[in-house]
Image (tube, rainbow, N blue to C red):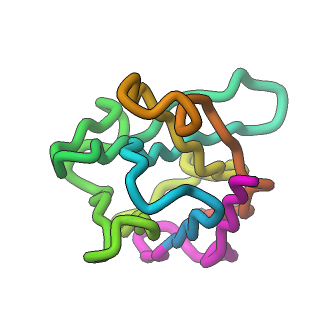
Amino acid sequence: QVQLVESGGGSVQAGGSLRLSCVASGYAWYCKYDMNWYRQAPGKEREFVSVIHDDGSTTYADSVKGRFTISQDSAKNTAFLQMNSLKPEDTAMYYCKTTSTDWAHLTCLGDYWGQGTQVTVSS
């Protein structure tokens, strides 16, 4: 059973930094999957923040480009989101999501979500 556990959230002042972590467990060693970060502010839709694909390539939402950096450990089961120059509008619950389209291994397929970690940025 795949489980995702996020950590690293907290409260910071505008201009500060936080580093989020997401640990994925339960995947078979041969599974390939992308690790995503999403966020949801109160009263708003959940939105995409960033993704690191299994091949190491990355994509960012325009709103965080140049300020956030996604990375992964060598085992590829932990993703990090380094968030710099934080703004009050970055305040949200941040969720980790894994996505597998590894059709060569059907047992790997699917999307999984973590429980989220709260980030609060004060002005």
Q: Where is residue 112 in the image (x, y as percent from the top left)?
A: 67, 40
Question: What residue is at 42 percent from the left and 64 percent from the top?
Answer: 79
Depicted 105 relative to depicted 9: above or below: above
Left or right, 7 with reference to 30: right
Q: Give the range drawn in magenta.
A: 1-19
Q: Which of 70 and 102 is in front in this view?
A: 102
Depicted 31 relative to depicted 102: above or below: below
Question: What residue is at 31 percent from the left and 67 percent from the top?
Answer: 72
Depicted 104 relative to depicted 15: above or below: above
Q: Can residue 9 be seen in this view?
A: yes
Question: What residue is at 65 percent from the left and 49 percent from the top?
Answer: 95
Magenta segment: does it hold 2?
A: yes
Left or right, 116 with reference to 20: right
Depicted 63 relative to depicted 96: above or below: above
Q: Position of residue 59 (x, y in %)?
A: 25, 36
- Tell me where residue 57 sits by quadrant: top left
Question: What residue is at 28 percent from the left and 64 percent from the top?
Answer: 71
Q: Position of residue 24 (x, y in %)?
A: 58, 63
Q: Nearer the viewer, residue 73 or 84?
A: 73
Q: Where is residue 34 in the image (x, y as percent from the top left)?
A: 39, 42
- Tell me where residue 50 sits by quadrant: top left
Magenta segment: does it hold 102?
A: no
Left or right, 41 with reference to 110: right
- Tell me where residue 101 sits by quadrant: top left
Q: Nearer the viewer, residue 74 or 94?
A: 74
Quarter containing the C terminus: bottom right
Q: Can residue 83 be seen in this view?
A: no
Q: Nearer the viewer, residue 58 or 122?
A: 58
